[in-house]
Amino acid sequence: MDRMTIEMLKSRFGENAVKFSGEIELDDSHVEEETQEEAQRAEQEGWWKNSTFEIVSRVGFLLGVPEHIFENEHSPLKLEIFQELSQDREASIIRNLCILRTAIEKKYSKINHAIYYDLKNLHTLPEYIPQEALQALSDMGLRIIKANYQLQNYLFDINGHIKNHVGNVRRVFPTWLNFDYVKDLFLMPRGDTAEGCKNAAAEYYGNYNCYPYHVYMNWAPKDKGNLLLNDKKFVTWLYEENQDLFDDMSKVSDISDETRRAIYDFIDSSESVILAVDCENSSAYRLYAALSSLSQEEAEKIDKILLYDDVHTSSTWKLLNRLTAIPTERILAERVVESKSQVDVRLAAGICREHYKNGVSSFILAASDSDYWGLIQEMPDAKFLVMYEYEKCSPSLKAELAQRGIFFCALNDFNTSDARIRELALLYEMEDYLAEHMSVNVKDMFETAITNTRIDMTEVETAQFRRKYIQPMRLSVAEDGTATIVLGR
């Protein structure tokens, strides 16, 4: 290493630069083996049981984790997520920018030496710089290469591009995840200054083995194992790092393989299956999560869903038939006495009718009420699988079910990260509210204004006025939540 290179390294990384600079090979050869060992150890020790891998796969893609990691059967990062995001332009932009940034950080001194002494550029250094990343960005309209450009300035540019584009990948994450926390992982602090880049590089080299899959990201590196091991570990850490608490584990976990197999075995061994739901004692969101967890093949084996509903339950139940291919019937149990619900009686009568009249052999009962135990006892020829909710089901009922050999599982344990039903429920409710409170006929409004002002307008003037002021009308929302319709001006 020549004297000028040493001085350059010291100016960038400090006096200890030679110890951790790019002149020392940063070894990536054991990343996959280490990940496999950690995953096996986590499984043996029961860490983060039944976690999902949706979030870590998306973060890993954007950070530039190599494709072969996703292809490894032992990797927690899912190949289907990689393939999905590869078709997304904005996600691909962030990924390729991060790939370039990590490549530069790994071999900074060698790349800088080649540019300074050999008059090379990024596109003529395939041994250090992934050329496919440069080409992909160019194809998407983001030209990185510039003539007679210093390596440090390339880092400034890349950090600037990431900062400008990272907000566009908000939509690839679920709405329940705080995207501001995720976004910060991609932003190098003061990445447009020499000091900021120098500090980030020193942190990276000094703690290289702490970075997941050795890709650069903005965090205070600690020896926490692979942060991208699963969603529970990553999201819990992410919120803690932002002095926040994430406690809805149903978003980052799912039922066990044993529970899934038991449900499938119940369905497969039945001649006919009906899912009967007590809407008063079940959550529409959790039931939707349970239905979403079924494979299409298994879902098609359920003959129909019977929703026994009451006028006082969530309006979300009306949406369920739009979100599942299973035929769904909503039975509204009208009240004879206002204080007394008829749902229990109607559900019990409906199951009896389906079994004795229509010959249905098996029922999945989504209910937590112990009153249904009497129904199950009186129908010895029918098979039952019970889905309950923790906070609504008594230990005695679960004990009776277990003694009878009836399989039961908690709706709370199904993964609820799919926000479609919540979002649709809110949107439909707001649309109904707007239709009731803000219905305006703009044609009548304009004609009334013409009459009251006694202004004569030609057809051309009328058309131009409509295009200029009426068609661009918009909704303006004040800080206190008050919404008003504002004419275009």
Image: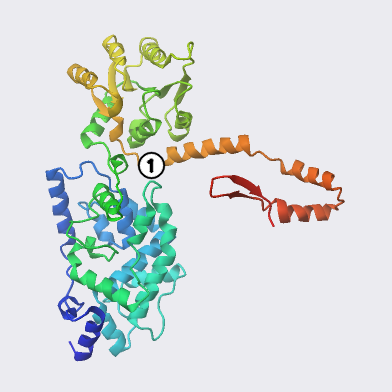
The residue that label 1 is drawn on is 418
**Residue closest to the eye, 95 or 161:** 161
Image x and y of residue 15, in percent: 18, 81
**Direction from residue 205 to residue 427 in the image, left or right:** right
Q: What element carries label 1?
A: loop
Question: What amino acid does circle 1 point to?
Answer: Asp
Q: Which residue is drawn at 31% across and 14% down?
A: 371
411 relative to 478, above or below: above
131 relative to 284, above or below: below
Rendered image quadrant of residue 344: top left
**Direction from residue 271 to residue 1 in the image, left or right:** left
Count residues near mark 1 (Cα–Cα under 10 Å), then give few for <14, some for 14-19, many for 20+.
some
Can see residue 244? yes
**Residue closest to the eye, 484 or 263:** 484
**Residue closest to the eye, 127 or 284:** 284
**Residue closest to the eye, 13 or 333:** 13
Query: Which quadrant: the C terminus?
Result: bottom right
**Direction from residue 444 to residue 350 in the image, left or right:** left
Rendered image quadrant of residue 136: bottom left
Q: Residue at x 31, y 77 (%)?
A: 195
Q: Residue at x 35, y 70 (%)?
A: 132
